[in-house]
Amino acid sequence: MPKNVLWIVSDEFRPDCLAGRFAEYVKTPNLDALAAQGTLFERCYCQASPCAPSRMSMHTGRYMCSTGAVDNMTPLAEPEDNLAMWLRRHGRTAGIAGYNDYAMDPALLPGDHPHRSSLCYDYFLPGYEVVLDHEYDSPEWFEYLKRRGYPEEWCNREEMQATRVPPGGVNGHLPCHFPARYRAEDSEAAFLTGRAVEYIEKNAGQGWFLNLNYIKPHPPYISPAPYHAMYPPETVPAPLRDPGEYDDPHPYFKALRDDFSKRQFAEEAVWREIRACYFGMVAEIDHCVGMLVESLKRTGQWGDTMVIFGADHGTCLGDHFLTGKPHFYEQSVRVPLIVRVPDLHDAGAAPSRMDCIVENVDLAPTICEHLGLPAMPRAQGLSLLPVLRGASPAKNRAVFEFYYHNVLRETGNAHPAECRLWMLRNEKFKYVQFGQGHLPPMLFDLEDDPGETRNLAESPQYAGVVAECCQELLRWRIRNEDLRMEEWARQYR
């Protein structure tokens, strides 16, 4: 039978919900079952944040320094160098559902197009057949809700992102403490899953590929009953942070806007209710994964389908007094990754867990090798199949990049290209280098200080480590320059 690929991407899904400090608290039976029948990579890292830069790296197999898509709504140049186009060039179809966060190069648009002079990242990369355009919602979902009996005045984004707050008000709670207006079986995630199931079943036997993208557990923090009350706020684990981190004195954090600095989720009532809602959203995504797996098994496609579950980045949820996914801490840059390859895992030829360092840029090369396709010429990631088959890990480090010019408190004379940080994480240390010369580097010993609270970069005894990490980062950057034209010329020299 032809091989299928189901590549699921959840937005802001923390890996410690599957393996780590939340794994015993958050119940994810369907993802746990998928991991047991595949491989859970415990140390996978994204290459950028926020969403768009990370996703462009995932779909091209290239680092942010190569794609140039450094922020949400930054256009991607030469977008045809992506996984979907590569599949199509080799006779495969490529479907996508949810969203893609691709901003189109204005040079590709007609002269009078409004997005030649305004920003938008609501496009899909070329090569993809759009199964359903559905990020937070979609017109199709609203029409579905009307058919299900929901009042027409509710069927819009504003109403469906509002929770059912009692007539007496929130009574000291956050709005996310209350359930969504929609029932769980009618949620935006359930609707998207239903469309994905239709695609899977309609294309049975044809060798399909589907990239399925869920916005949850990304904000807005909202879940339907029973998920909204599944995790009582008084029971949720507390954030990992040192009191001295609040209003961090490092000049990098001092330069950022308040919403990106270490002043978030300081109040216990806030982090408790947000975390409770977040874990409920995770449980809802887990249920959706169960629906997908059930469809594959019921239609006889389970043994022919590679399944990948991952995320574009993590989220802090109050750790380090931060919210969202910026900066370089493990909570932001480490992501879940489950890979199931039927011919390997059904034969018991691959481990159920691996703790080697891998990266999101490795996913596109992995898919290509699994489908028997040539490697994408510009891809910088490495296929994970050799590691799954027992080869020694090809990497001992991960690299992450973050462009912070757009979140500075004051841009002043800051050169935009310098307002970037690079994180190098190896087996023992995490090193952070800033492009602006006045910002000192940071260094954390992840073995002795897994919470990343003690910056060792200015300690004389670690001067050698700082120098070696800086050199390694420089070598990585040189190795990932775009030398396509020389690659072509070399064959004729």
Image (tube, rainbow, N blue to C red):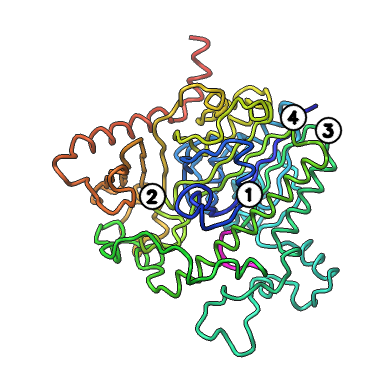
Which label sits on residue 100?
1
Which label sits on residue 328?
2
Residue at (73, 61) in percent of width and height: 138
**Magenta region's main secondary structure?**
loop
Q: Is residue 219 magenta?
A: yes
**CA neighbours of label 4 inside 10 A, class few (<14), some (14 to 19), many (20+):** some
Which residue lies most toward the front here?
A: 24
Which residue lies most toward the left here?
A: 460
Q: Are marks 1 and 4 in contact (CB under 8 Å)?
A: no
Q: Which residues are magenta?
A: 217-224
Type of the residue with mark 3 = Gly
In the rendered structure, which disc, 1 or 4, sits on the residue that comes first in sequence? 4
Q: CA distance from mark 1 to mark 2?
A: 23 Å
Type of the residue with mark 4 = Lys
Left/right placement of residue 148 relative to residue 283 reads right
Horizontal and vertical percent position of residue 92: 75, 31
Q: CA distance from mark 1 to mark 4?
A: 23 Å
Q: CA distance from mark 2 to mark 3?
A: 43 Å
In the rendered structure, which disc, 1 or 2, sits on the residue that comes first in sequence? 1
Residue at (83, 33) in percent of width and height: 205
Q: Report which residue position mark 3 lands on.
A: 205
Q: Report which residue position mark 4 lands on.
A: 3
In the rendered structure, which disc, 4 or 2, sits on the residue that comes first in sequence? 4
Badge 3 marks a residue whose secondary structure is loop
Q: Quadrant of the N terminus?
A: top right
